[in-house]
Image (cartoon, rainbow, N blue to C red):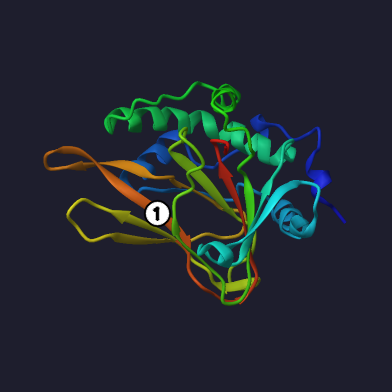
Amino acid sequence: MRTLDSLNAAEISADQISFRVSEAEITQSLDEKGYAILKGVISELECQVLADGYDAEDPYRSRVVMSRHGFGQGEYKYFDYPLPDLITCLRTKLYEPLAIIGNRWNELMNIDQRFPETHQQYLDVCHKAGQVKATPLILQYGEGDYNCLHQDVYGELLFPLQVACLLSKPGEDFTGGEFVLTEQRPRMQSRVEVVPLDQGDAVIFPVRHRPKQGTRGIYRVNMRHGVSEIRSGQRHTLGIIFHDAQ
């Protein structure tokens, strides 16, 4: 049986990870829809290993029971450094094209922060600012659990995009539990988007804001995300956040 330790394999490298869509397609989808789907980013076996490893202790720095904080129902665990190689490679591979988008978005929204070329360079910036705790996490939901609409902000430094990878099989491992995005537009009612995901798929989405073209130019919309109630079974998700926490 493979364990989380087996994900620390020498053959895993960022260059071997492919997304099946071009960077141009990712950019277009994020600009137009506010999210982009990457099909089959994690293999079925890797999904199983990550989900089965939830009950382990060594890879994690903390466990959060969501009901204690009003976050919803369910729980999640933050990985500690050093991260499993698979997660490090996903962070590294995803960061570079998303940093280009993030820089453009921040410029359009008149946000001063800019992002360096590599993820390690960005982590160095976070750590110098006192944001040193790893933020990748695994979420576990059972029947009746859900995740309230929220934003993953862990300090003053914030990378504008993040990724969620579904580790469980919809319709087999669980029912319900749809990934939901909301877009709050100025002086307008919020728009809701349900994002369809299969096992191993990833969705890229905004952490807090995204730019949107209006009749008078670019304006900023407020984004939140969550998970609808699990009707049956158990659902696991890998969350990849690029800024570290205080």
Percent x, y for residue 110? 27, 29
Question: As drawn, is 118 to the left or to the right of 102?
Answer: right
For the point 46% across and 60% down, the residue is: 226
For the point 71% across and 41% down, the residue is: 80
Query: Which is more toward the observer, 222 or 10?
Result: 222
Q: Assign the C terminus to one quadrant of the image.
A: top right
Residue type marked 1: Arg
Percent x, y for residue 137? 63, 49
Percent x, y for residue 182? 35, 57
Query: Which is more toward the observer, 151 or 196?
Result: 151
Q: Which residue is mark 1?
A: 224
Question: As drawn, is 145 to the left or to the right of 222?
Answer: right
For the point 73% across and 48% down, the residue is: 60
Q: Local crowd at mark 1 within 10 Å, few (<14), some, or many (≥20)?
A: many
Label 1 SS? strand
Image: 157 above or below 198: above
